[in-house]
Image (tube, helix red, strand yellow):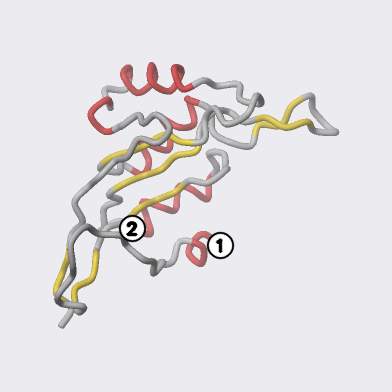
Amino acid sequence: MWRETLKRITGIVALEGSINNVANTANDRIYISGDTLMCDELKEIPKIYADQKIDLMLIHLGGTTIPSPHIPLLMVTMDAKQGIELLKLVCPDMTIPIHYDDYDVFLSPLSDFKKAVEEAGLSSKVVYLDRKDQYKFKTTWTDSS
C-alpha cells in the first residue's frame, strides 16, 4: 500500500532567479505526514528509501481528536510521543511541525513536542515556524542531460 502511495511526485518548485538549463532536476525529498497516526505501515518508509535521505519533513501534530460513536474521542493526528517516534524513524535533515493548533480539538500542544524534541536531543533537527513565517532550504540539483 505505502509503496504505491509514496511514489515520486513531480511538482513545480518556486525558485528565485532563473533556471537556464531545463535539464537540471531537483533531488530533494519532502515528506508530509498528513493527518495520520504512528502505525506499522509508516515503518516501511526507511526501508523504501534506505539509500536516500529525506531532506524535510512536515509533520502534522496536535493529537487532533474528533467525536466517535465507540469511544469518547478518536485521535486522528499524532501527539508529541508519536511525533518523536516518526522523527526518529524517518530521520529527516529538518522537520517542521504543522497543523497543531488550527482548531480547538487538539489534545497535545506544541510545547509537548518541543519538550520531547529537547529530551531526545533532536533540537537541531526541528524548526518551529509561526504563521506566515517561511523556511528556506537549498535544493540539490543534478544535471540529467
Residue at 45 percent of width and 32 percent of height: 83
**Secondary element at image label 2:** loop
The reply, left or right, for residue 117 in relation to residue 20 is right
Which amino acid type is shown beneath numbered disc 1? Met
The image quadrant that residue 119 belongs to is top left
Which residue is disc 2 drawn over?
Answer: 49
Picture layout, residue 57 above or below residue 67:
below
Residue 50 spot, x, y in % from top left: 30, 56
The reply, left or right, for residue 60 in relation to residue 92 is right
User: What is the CA distance from the residue labelled 2 to the residue labelled 1?
Assistant: 15 Å
The reply, left or right, for residue 92 in relation to residue 113 is left
Picture layout, residue 117 above or below residue 58:
above
Residue at 21 percent of width and 78 percent of height: 22
Front in this rendered view, residue 106 or 40: 106
Residue lying at the far bottom of the rendered structure:
145
Which residue is disc 1 drawn over?
Answer: 1
